[in-house]
Image: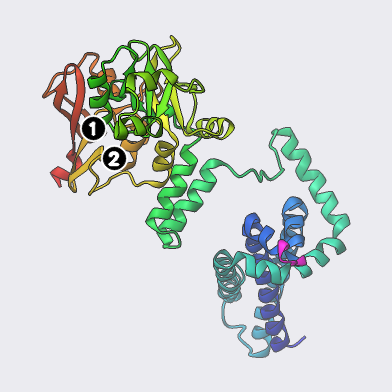
Amino acid sequence: MSILLKIIIIFLLVVISAFFSVSEIALASARKLKLQGLIEEGNERAQKILKIQENSGDFFAIVQIGINIVSILGGSLGSSIVKDIIIKFKLSHYNENVLSVISFLLITFLFVQFADLIPKRVAMVYPENIALKTVNLMSILIFVFKPVIKIINFIADFVLGIFRIDSARNETVTYDDIVAVVDAGAVSGILQEKEHSLIENIFELDSRWVSSIMTTRDEISYLTLDDSEETLREKIMDYPHNKFLITSSDIDSILGYVTSKDLLPSIMLNEKPISELIKNYRKNLLILPNTLTLSETLDRFNEAKDDFAIILNEYGLVVGLVTMKDVVNTLMGDIVFQNSEDQQIISRDENSWLIDGVTSVEDVKKVLDRIERFPEEDTYESLAGFLIYMLKTIPKRGAKLDFMGYRFEIVDVDNYKIDQILVIDLQQERM
């Protein structure tokens, strides 16, 4: 065999090795979700790729067989080329070992660079496209070498079994996987900021308690059967809601509710006293426990065909009120509303925020991005609750707490209730 022919064969071996390398990465990296989309479009090769991924042992076995055979042949030819060059060009006066080392380095460079590194880098960039082009030939090779593959897999499974290592590929898509894909889409610009925020909020429905978005009991306006006509009118005028709770005395003695439509004729035309109208309250009031998530709350609203519910604690006391609008606003709305009169988080500058004490810790974490979780956050719901937990007392105005590089300072307290908290990013302040 001539030297030229051997060199050509070596380059062919490099091409064959490159095929196995590019196929290995492409077929292993091809994303299942994208392949399923191609299958729905009628692409049969995508189905073959999924089948190969399900039997990854066969696939990796044929790749290793191919790469090792090519490497052995490449090494043997490289060594024989050195001897042929010495004989043909009468280079016996040169050290044969030196020529062999040079030949080894050249052959190694060819295989490492062109048969391994470059193909794998290309396959990582275009896994699905390359997998679709190589899957047919790879399937043929797996079929031809099936007996050898079975022996190799038997030995591999035996060794893995000794160490109790599961060889099956886990295709379960987790919450973290989806979040990672969404975050990657936002970084790449495929998803807009509002779309990214919406998807994040959707995932929170199953992990966020209804009490984190409810109107707390001290902010609920209600009408009692004992209220005078003048008091009733003042409450209705001061709090123009669509629905009003009706109680016998205090907020925990709820009887039902009336709508503004029920009261409007009396207010406009003075047909009947309001005190008489509220006695005909509606009793089908939706009552929910404070242990529901937002997702479960949506289900209850759908079942009851209602958009208004009272939240009770384990002692049967009213802790708040929630509406369908509250849930939708949490799902659709941004966290920081620069022009909203009802804003709970106000960005003062790049490094500080003024936050309402009742703001949910979930909303606070979205603004203070270094905080992934508050200590024992399942035991409280609001930022005020976090400060009370950490300081182990009912904090007074001016109380401070440093946590995760942020300083939390209470700037307003109303009758033991923490109203406003100033949060400063200490790490950014020092820069």
Residue 41: say if magenta. Answer: yes
Which residue is rendered at x = 51% and y = 23% of the image? 284
* Residue depicted at x 25% and y 40%: 343
Label at residue 356: 1
Please, is residue 355 above or below residue 228 in the view?
below
Counting from the top left corner in percent of width and height, residue 22 is at 64, 67
Q: Is disc 2 in contact with disc 1, using a CB cutoff of under 8 Å?
A: no
Compared to residue 413, the image places residue 139 above or below, namely below
* Mark 2 residue type: Leu
Position of residue 281 in the picture relative to residue 161 (left or right): left
Q: Earlier in the sequence, mark 2 or mark 1?
A: 1
The amino acid type of the residue labelled 1 equals Asp
Q: Outermost residue, left direction?
A: 398
- Determine whether, in the image, residue 104 is placed left or right of residue 217: right
Q: Toward the viewer: 77 or 60?
A: 60
Residues drawn in magenta: 39-44
Rendering coords of residue 5 (x, y %): 73, 86
Query: In the image, which disc is placed on residue 340?
Result: none
Q: Which residue is mark 2?
A: 368
| Marks 2 and 1, how far apart at CA | 14 Å
**Observer able to see residue 348:** yes
